[in-house]
Image: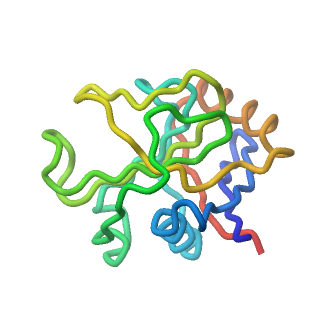
Amino acid sequence: MRQIYFKEPKSGLSVRCDLLDDKAPSSAEFLWQLAQRRMSYDALHAIWTGPELSCPLPASVLPEDLAQTVIPPENATSFPECGEILLACISAGAVKGLPPGNFFDIGLFYGHGARMLMPFGWIKANVCAKMVAEDLTHAQSAIQSIKLNGACKLLIEPVE
């Protein structure tokens, strides 16, 4: 099973996640390709969805091949569970007010009661990875620290 890390040095976040290749192959591959580049992206605690660390990825911050990716609905939900990683994909021009190009968002859900209700309405996102059980408690604590301290840089890399 392929795994990726999400890391954030200030909070001490370091969580391994199993990619769900069998349930969400396109979404899992997108995360895997992102992890291979070992880059950091802006992230912040979500406002609308509840217990989520959100990593918005407008096309402008992604390598061109990933920015052009079309991700189909797969293993999609509007009600994420604790420990799930979701990939939201919004096609260019589908929602007023988003930056130009395709828009992606990686959500790290660390508690119960989450919902994919945005200011523009309900959406579904693909459940494409799951936090490793033994890393969950630490991730919950670290994400709470991020929530209190504001935006951060989230590193995504493969587990080797």
> Measured along the vertical axis of the image, is residue 127 above or below residue 29?
above
**Display coloring:** rainbow
Direction from residue 119 to residue 66 in the image, left or right: right
The spot of residue 92 in percent (x, y) is 18, 57
Quadrant of the drawing holding the C terminus: bottom right
Direction from residue 92 to residue 61 in the image, left or right: right
**Which of 99 and 69 lies nearest the eye of the viewer?**
69
The spot of residue 68 in percent (x, y) is 28, 71
> Measured along the vertical axis of the image, is residue 5 above or below residue 67?
above
Q: Residue at x 36, y 63 (%)?
A: 71
Farthest-out residue, right: 134
**Which of 50 and 11 lies nearest the eye of the viewer?**
50
The spot of residue 55 in percent (x, y) is 47, 47
Q: Residue at x 46, y 40 (%)?
A: 77
Number of callouts: 0
**Which of 11 and 129 lies nearest the eye of the viewer?**
129
Quadrant of the drawing holding the N terminus: bottom right
Direction from residue 96 to residue 151 in the image, left or right: right
> Measured along the vertical axis of the image, is residue 139 above or below residue 157?
above
| Figure quadrant of residue 51 | top right
Q: Residue at x 57, y 70 (%)?
A: 32
| Figure quadrant of residue 36 | bottom right
Q: Residue at x 68, y 29 (%)?
A: 145
Direction from residue 24 to residue 83 in the image, left or right: right
